[in-house]
Amino acid sequence: MLNRKFAVLMLKIKSLDVLKIKEFRYFVYTRLILTLAIQMQITTIGFQVYYEYGRNELFLGLVGLVEAIPSIATSFFSGHLADIISRRRILIFTTLALLLGSAFLFFFSSPDFLFLHSLGVMALFTIVFVFGVTRSFYSAASPAFMSQLVPRNLYTQSATWNSIVWHTGAILGPALAGVVYGIGNENHADWCYAINCLLFLWGLVFYLLIKPKAIPAREKHESVVDSMKAGIKFVFKNNMVLSALSLDLFAVLFGGAVAIIPAFTDKVLHLGPEANGLLRTAPAVGAVITSFLFVFWQPGKNAGKNMLWSVAAFGAFTIAFALCTNYWLAFFMLLMTGAFDNVSVIVRHSILQLMTPDNMRGRVSAINSIFIGSSNEIGAFESGVAARFLGLVPSIIFGGGMTILVVLGVNRLNPKLRKLDITRL
């Protein structure tokens, strides 16, 4: 019996075969480095907006909205572009743009360049706006490019490792920003942005090490408008894809409490930036734990059912977080939100990779970015506004409750999702 269990374990460990692909490893390294830099940068901007400009929760929400608007506005075109030109080239240029943005933020925040300080909080919002545009192109090209690096039978494994490195970066980024920003009870945003610059440069080098890939063949030549319409039509005609995207969209839109963690840490837990940075990593810690479990246990016949239950649990633990007054209990509740949310993330990525033709991956990735990526920022705005008018704790409880209602609604509208078996896709 013991030998049989060991043999089964070894068979599951063969799922690590995707890491034997050198260019996928380069992609994973870059994903980790860029996520670390991006999370560190957006956390630092949040610190500056909150601690240096009036401790206003609404400002934290506005950061999300200012990023989401340009991201949504350019996403359809970025998806079209990712299907007709080199995805590697898009990733290289977007990484370079992020590097230049961090360099500006370094000079803006440095005490040696006081003349830039007169630009005030609008300088931060301007960079966030530019970052939103950049992110739309990066988000459209990155998942599509990853699919070109691995064979189809390893798509779920690539999605799992992509999730592991993203959430690892999401853990380290805010924590590092919190530690560096608050060193010596002073604000060191410039130090954070200097580290960002080095990380973006490092990520750029890894992208350059990956060889260019062929541009996917197009079935027919379409205008830009027709191309974008085709991507939208594909998503809305595929009930499984639409249901998976909708679940995550509304869960993050209503249930995401990450954006107002600085206010929660300050006004409920009565702690400073260092504690805030660590607390912000809690969902990512839970997500990494889930991701490693998925290395050995792949979502299969019960993928749809697991997805529904996990999003409902995400909403329940969000409500539990709102009721916490102890720091470590709050950390645990946020950890659990991340753990359950990541089940949905991995299943959704597997569905998108397995059900999307290669010549449409850019457009579908862009729509995924609108549904999921931008919902983080719009959700941040919703959280900020709700906290302003409902109160901090009631707004988080409201968001968790709405998430659970969304699960019930999706389950009713698409009962086939409960029976989803991704091993047959």
Image (cartoon, rainbow, N blue to C red):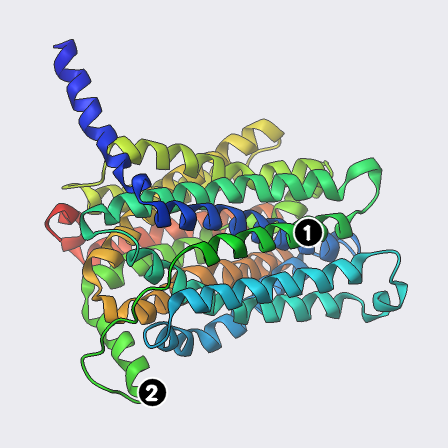
* Circle 2: element type: helix
Residue 190 in sight from this viewpoint = yes
In the image, residue 79 above or below residue 222: above
Which quadrant would residue 165 be assigned to in this image? top left
Q: Crowdedness of circle 1 by 10 Å Cα count: few (<14), some, many (20+)?
A: many
Residue 416 image position (x, y, % from top left): 14, 54
Neighbor class of circle 2 (other Cα within 10 Å; few <14, some 14-19, many 20+) is few
Residue at horizontal 32%, vertical 48%?
159
Query: Which residue has dot 2 on it?
Result: 225
Whole-percent x and y of residue 199? 60, 50
What is the secondary structure assignment of the residue under circle 1?
helix
Q: Quadrant of the N terminus?
A: top left
Direction from residue 307 to residue 370 in the image, left or right: right
Look at the image and tell me whether residue 322 can be seen.
no
Residue type pointed to by label 2: Val
**Image check: 171 left or right of 424?**
right
Tell me the residue that label 1 is attached to.
44
Residue ID at (54%, 62%): 95
396 or 330: nearer the viewer: 330
| Marks 2 and 1 close (CB-CB < 8 Å) | no
Q: Horizontally, is 320 left or right of 215 in the view? A: right
- The tag earlier along the polypeptide, 2 or 1, is 1
State the mark number for residue 240: none
The kind of residue tagged 1 is Thr
Residue positioned most to the bottom:
223
- Give residue 217's quadrant in the image: bottom left
| Separation of residues labelled 2 and 1 (CA atoms) | 38 Å
In this rendered view, identify the residue nearer to me: 363 or 50.
363
> Image point 16% across, 54% down: which residue?
415
Residue drawn at x 16%, y 20% is 7
